Structures are given as C-alpha cells and as structure tokens.
Image (cartoon, grey):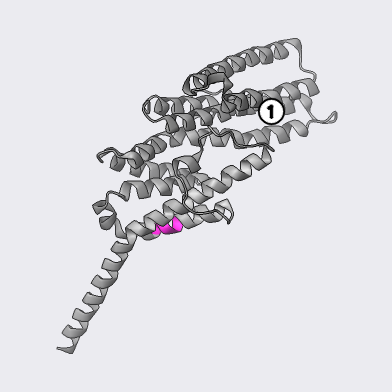
Amino acid sequence: MEYAMMTSRLSAVFLIVLFASSCQAPEAYRRAQEAFSQGAKVEMRDRFQTLAGERPQELVYLDNLYPSTTAAQAARDAYYELALTEVRTALQGKRQLRKVDALDNTYAIQALSQWRQRDYTAALATAATAIPLLEDQSPDEDDTRDLAMMRALPGLIKLDVAYQQLAVAKTLGEAITVTSNQDSSYQLVRQQFLDYGQANQDGSNSVIRGVALVQSVLEKVENEPNLRRYFLNAQLAGVDTYGDLLLETYQAARRTEQGAEEIAWINQEREAYDRLIATHLERLEKLLPEGRDSALYRFWKRVL
C-alpha cells in the first residue's frame, strides 16, 4: 500500500515537472531569440568599429531580421551561447512548442546560433531538421524569414569559410622571402584563390559557390525586401573576399617575379572580378529606391 502511494506521488511529481517544463518552452524560445538578436547586434557594431566607418542606414544585417528589444552589453559569443542554452531548455517541451507553432522557429534559432559560433556541421544538421517543419507550416512573417535563412545557410557558411581562408592567404603571402622556395610559396597563395574564390564544383567552400547558393534563395523572396537586401549584402561581402584573395595572389606573383603568362592570367581574373562587381552593384542599384545615390550603394562601391 505504501509502495503504491509512493509510486503515485512520484508519478504526480513527474507530471507536474513535465508540465512546468512544457509551459516554459515557448518562453525559453523567446529568450533564445532575444539572446541571438543581441549577439547579432554586438557583432554588427564591432564589425563597423573595425571598418572605422558608420553603418549605412539601408544595410540589413541579422539584427534587423531578428530585432532585439533590449540593449546589448555582453560579448557576442556570450549571447550566442546563451541562445543555445535557452534552445536546449525550450526543446525539452517540444509538444508545447508544436502547439504554439514555434518548434520550427526554435530549431532555426539553434541553427543560426551554431552558425555564428562557427559550428558549421551542427548548424547544417539543425537547418536540415528545421526546413521540413517550416515548409509544413502556414507561412507567417517569422516562418518566411526563418525558412529563407535555413535554405541560404549552406551558401552563407561557404562565404564565411572563404573569408576565414583569406587570412591564410595573407599569412602565406607575408611569409614569402628571398630565401624561401618562392615558386612553391606562390603556388600556395594561388591555390587559396582557386579553392576559396573561384572553385565552382559542388561542395566547394568558395565565394562563387556561396554566392550562387544565396542567389537561388534570394530569387524566391521577391516580396521580402529586407531578406533580399540582407542576402545581396552577404553576396557583396563575398565578392569583396574574392577580390582580396585575387589581390593576395597578384602581390605574391609580384614578390616571386612570376612570368608574363602568369601575370596575364591574373589580369584575366581581374577582368572577371570587375564583371562580378558590376553584376552585383547593378542588382543593388535596382533594389534601392535611391539607386546609385543611396548611401549603401556608395558604401559598397567604395569597399569594392
């Protein structure tokens, strides 16, 4: 009899804890989204401090797509880690998240936070979980945004990897000395451009592949001006990386006194880069009401 009563009490306690956990799930999701938004706000602020310039008003970044309601005071990584902690809490109540149509959005915030923490494998896996859930919902504003971001994530990650490899190219170029094996050193820098700028094979972590994947998503959000502007800005940042990789190759070629044939190849690549710039600046011009007179257009014109 006592054993039965104890078992009954334990079951009741378990149900109470489970119910409380489930009720907390939507609130934990909202806290996760807020933490992610604050991390994005700090990241964008820090980026423009590094550029020693003001953020153009028309520039759409993650903190515009996921606006924060409170001031951000901590470091970006602390906010992204907090977002992941809150997501883990929220996912303990999946049933409650489904009831309020937020399970798909919770996975989206998890994928985005993993992405900004450079946990790319986990981010892609989480995005793959989120996409069918988002596709299965009657789309609202949040679902449209999250679905587009999840579909674009593979391309955005490729652009991030390419940017990180630019630092490798710079280090390789700076290491070239008169006593080094100069031709071998040049080939290493050149390969960075080929692999992370120009490569167009499936699976390549290159600017060209990243830009193409983002473009395929951009074309599906014709009625979402903020998303279109965000994706185009991401592409333009990738184009800038492409140009910097090519510049490192050119400088390495000059340091190692490459022959006329190699310099001619670099010049051809420069012409291709100029065409890439023209294509994306034209798209930006058409997207902005003020066109070439826009501060955002002038910003990218100056950067590129």
**Dot 1 surroundings within 10 Å: few (below 14), some, or many (20 or more)?**
many
Quarter of the N terminus within the rendering: bottom left
In the image, residue 221 above or below residue 270: below
Instruction: Pick out the residue farthest to the bottom.
Output: 2
The residue lying toward the viewer, choosing from 199 and 60, is: 60
Question: Whole-percent x and y of residue 272?
Answer: 59, 14
Q: Is 22 in the magenta?
A: no
* 252 in relation to 66, above or below: above
- Residue at image position (45%, 35%) is 154
Asked which quadrant contains residue 195, the reply is: top right
Q: Amino acid at mark 1?
A: Val
Residue located beneath label 1 in the image = 189
> Residue 38, how many percent across, how many down?
51, 51
At x 42% / y 27%, what residue is drawn? 218
Between 138 and 175, the one lying in front of the other is: 138
Task: Give, as a single range, the part of the protein colored magenta.
Answer: 84-88
Image quarter hosting the C terminus: top right
Q: Quick check: 231 left or right of 25?
A: right
Residue 285 location (% of width, % of height): 52, 20
Q: Is residue 56 visible?
A: yes
Name the spot of residue 138 as percent of width and height, x first.
25, 39
Viewer-proximal residue among 293 and 100? 293
